[in-house]
Image (cartoon, rainbow, N blue to C red):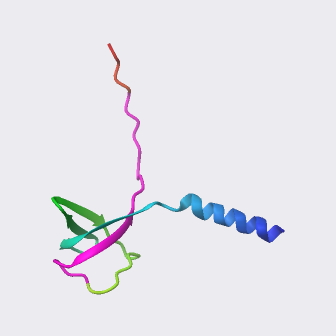
Amino acid sequence: MKNMVLLGALLFSMNAFAAKTYQVTGPIVELSDSRIIVQKGNDRWEIERNPNTKVMGDLKVGQKVTVEYTMAADSVEIKSESKKK
């Protein structure tokens, strides 16, 4: 019983920190060790890369790729509300 409670708490903790995953597909237009830029229609999607980024194959400019990524807030600043007249 004690193990079940610990397992439940662990699963709850993992879900609380799981970030929603998004994806973008298109050709690589720029590439470096720290970022990958993908063209999707008229928009350029700049996505950060880090040592933990999993890459299957050799990335090259011009290749069509699908990039999975997450978004998380680094900071939030509260702005004062404008006064209504």
Question: As drawn, is 27 to the left or to the right of 77?
Answer: left
Q: Position of residue 66 (x, y in %)?
A: 30, 73
The residue at the point 23 percent across, 74 percent down is 32
- In the orientation shown, which residue stands out farthest toward the right? 1
- What secondary structure characterizes most of the magenta part? loop
Q: Is residue 77 magenta?
A: yes
Q: Quadrant of the N terminus?
A: bottom right
Q: Nearer the viewer, residue 20 or 76?
A: 20
Q: Position of residue 85 (x, y in %)?
A: 32, 13
| 77 up-or-down from 41: above or below | above
Q: Nearer the viewer, residue 27 or 47?
A: 27
The residue at the point 20 percent across, 61 percent down is 44
What range of the chain is rendered magenta? 59-80
Q: Quadrant of residue 35?
A: bottom left
The residue at the point 65 percent across, 61 percent down is 12
Q: Position of residue 60 (x, y in %)?
A: 20, 81
Q: Position of residue 50 (x, y in %)?
A: 36, 72
